[in-house]
Every structure is written in C-alpha cells, then in structure tokens.
Image (cartoon, rainbow, N blue to C red):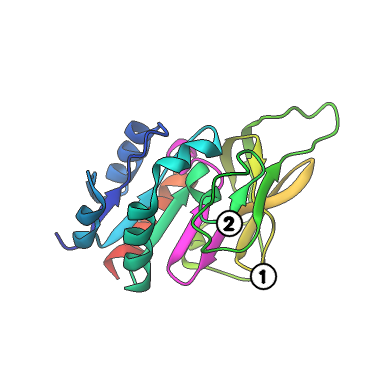
Amino acid sequence: MTGSIALVDYGAGNLASVRKGFLAAGADLYTPRQPEDLTRASGIAIPGVGHFGATASLASEWRDAILQRIHSGVPLFGICLGMQWLFEGSTEAPGIHGLGFLRGNCTRIVAPRPLKVPHVGWNTLEPSRRSGALLRNVHDGAYVYFTHTYAAPVTPECTATSTHGIEFAAVVERDQVCGVQFHPEKSGTTGLQILRNFVAMVRA
C-alpha cells in the first residue's frame, strides 16, 4: 500500500495511543508481525515507553530489516524509547545495543531539587539552528508532553532540545530518520502537526 506506515510492536506499550494519533494525522497504518512484513512499508514508526531493555525484542532480524529499509530511503520515526533506540545504547541497560544509526549513548537525567526524575509533564521545545522537516510549522517554545528518566545527548543531529536539570535532545533528524523524546500523540495540536509532518515525509 502506497504511503503505509509500519507501526512496530515489540512489546513496549502505548501502541493504541500512537495508532490513534497517527490516524488523526491521516496515516495509513499496519502492524508488521515479522521482519519480512517491512518490505511493503513506505514508512516505519518505532514507539515505546519504559526500560531500554525492552528494545532487546528488536533482535538482529528486525534490526537488519529496519536498516535495509532505511538504506532504501524509507523514513523512520522513533518515539520516546523508540528515539533512544536510534542511538548506540543506554546506561539503563548496558548490555543491550541500540540501532546505532546515531552516535552516542542515552543516560539518566540528573536534575537538582525541586525538579523530580522521572521528567513527567509539559515542557518547551527549543529548536536549534539546524532545521528539519519534522518541525515544519512548529513554533519556537512550543509545549510537548514528556515522560522519561533517560535522555539522549545533544549531537549534531539534534534539531530541538529541552531542559530538565540538563539539556537533552528532544528532536533528532538525520536524512529521513527522525525521532522525538516526547509523546506527540499526547502533545495536543503541536504533536498532531509533528505526526502530520512525518506522514508528509512518507508520502513525498
């Protein structure tokens, strides 16, 4: 199906809310049951919440299939834990490797009192000078909804940051691969615009 997005289910939750958000953005979705099902995807979404160890379910067959589709030019969108998985790994689960498409490792947020960790709630996006398609029509300082304990480093692929004790990557983009640390499906009109932007990338 032209323009269809594979919503990958690896047991890390929140699929229902992500599916609802994508449908509101006009996406055509399906859930691949095995790596071979990715061959018909025009886009791939990797959602997720919780512990980085859950990404171990994305074993070598899935990793190989996802990388093959990326190298074929298929857009990929990682959400929350799915964005962290784009990096090399996380100190939350040292023995588990990420996809390694982006350099660096995710680390625990260190925040002074009275800030609490996990970082849960609304926070602002601060776009960098490096623009990307995912943030098209999203204004500087827009509020989005976060819930996380670990965060990705600010690297050259970072197109927006947020701050909770430390500055961390809130949005990353490299070529047609992108990710957000927050939950666009819970971020109101701003989140819906970001989902629409990814759908537009898939259909371009």
Q: Circle 1 — which element?
A: loop
Q: Is residue 170 magenta?
A: no
Name the amino acid type tagged 1.
Arg
Please report the residue visible at 55 percent of the width from the left and 49 percent of the height from the top.
84
Instruction: Tally the marks.
Output: 2
The magenta span reads 171-187
Return the x and y of residue 128 as percentages of the image width and height: 67, 64
Q: Measured along the vertical axis of the image, is residue 74 above or below residue 37?
A: below
Q: Is residue 178 magenta?
A: yes
Q: Residue furthest left?
A: 1
Identify the residue position indicated by label 2 in the image: 88
Return the x and y of residue 28 as percentages of the image width and height: 21, 51
Return the x and y of residue 100 as percentages of the image width and height: 53, 60
Nearer-N-terminus badge (2/1): 2
Identify the residue position indicated by label 1 in the image: 129
Q: Circle 2 — which element?
A: loop
